[in-house]
């Protein structure tokens, strides 16, 4: 049995059990896709923008340095994404209570861990997605786990989870999809999902 689980771990399993086994049980490592690397430095830059009160351009350079990214084209792609004027307006109007907030909680002795991109002062959970194409139906599990994490860790929340979609093309508009869930969703429904998923994972791990 794994020593911990995460949203990405569980989502991988739900998408493809074989890929999950290869990745998390057999430990077969694949090269990180370029879009994922760009997304990672953009995420860190957004946090640094608030925490260090620096420009987004400075923040992306700092994020690349922290992650040992030397590919100039990746750094430039991050800078281009953060030139989106709508994004800057969005960030300026938000007051974060937590940034890159780490969480953990337990379900039947199984540890669930993760990081929340941002929790606003009104309690809204924010998750940034860097992409031109976003299908919120594919991410139905993330709000359940993150709202559950806030409830388990007594973090301020208003039961609203918002995806903020940042396009790779800075000329395109950012989009926001907000989901409001009740305790019955992120507690009882998630319990049922966990029971089914963990049982099957343990069967594959034998």
Image: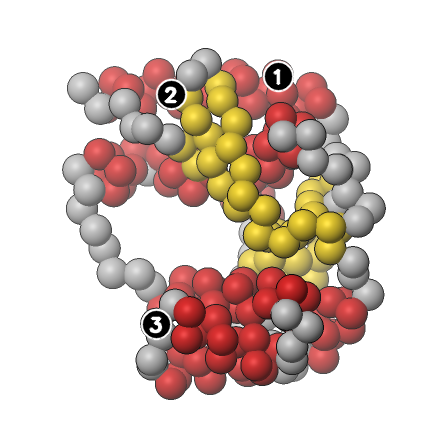
Residue 121 vs 128, above or below: the answer is above
3D distance between C-alphas at marks 1 and 3: 42 Å
Label 2: which secondary element:
helix
Q: Position of residue 157 (x, y in %)?
A: 75, 37
Looking at the image, is mark 1 or mark 3 earlier in the sequence? 3
Q: According to the image, what is the colour scheme of the structure?
A: secondary structure
Residue, x 23% and y 55% (percent of image)? 30
Q: Position of residue 119 (x, y in %)?
A: 70, 48
3D distance between C-alphas at marks 1 and 2: 15 Å
Q: Position of residue 60 (x, y in %)?
A: 52, 76
Residue, x 49% and y 79% (percent of image)? 61
Label 1: which secondary element:
helix
Q: Quadrant of residue 5?
A: top left
Looking at the image, is mark 1 or mark 2 earlier in the sequence? 1
Residue topped by disc 3: 68
Q: Is there a contact, CB below 8 Å, between mark 1 and mark 2?
A: no
For residue 69, side relative to residue 88 (left or right):
left
Residue topped by disc 2: 198
């Amino acid at each position: 049995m794994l020593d911990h689980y995460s949203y990405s771990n569980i989502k991988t399993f739900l998408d493809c059990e074989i890929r999950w086994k290869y990745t998390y049980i057999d430990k077969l490592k694949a090269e990180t896709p370029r879009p994922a690397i760009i997304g990672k430095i953009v995420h860190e830059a957004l946090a640094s923008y608030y925490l260090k009160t620096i420009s987004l351009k400075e923040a992306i350079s700092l994020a690349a340095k922290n992650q040992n990214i030397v590919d100039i084209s990746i750094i430039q792609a991050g800078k281009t994404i953060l030139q989106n004027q709508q994004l800057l307006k969005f960030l300026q109007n938000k007051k974060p209570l937590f940034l890159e907030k780490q969480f953990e909680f337990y379900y039947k002795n199984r540890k669930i861990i993760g990081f929340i991109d941002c929790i606003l002062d009104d309690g809204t959970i924010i998750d940034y997605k860097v992409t031109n194409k976003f299908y919120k139906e594919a991410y139905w599990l993330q709000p359940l786990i993150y709202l559950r994490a806030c409830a388990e860790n007594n973090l301020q929340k208003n039961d609203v989870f918002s995806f903020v979609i940042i396009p790779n093309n800075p000329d395109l508009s950012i989009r926001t999809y907000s989901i409001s869930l009740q305790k019955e969703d992120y507690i009882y429904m998630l319990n049922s999902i966990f029971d089914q998923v963990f049982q099957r994972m343990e069967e594959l791990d034998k």
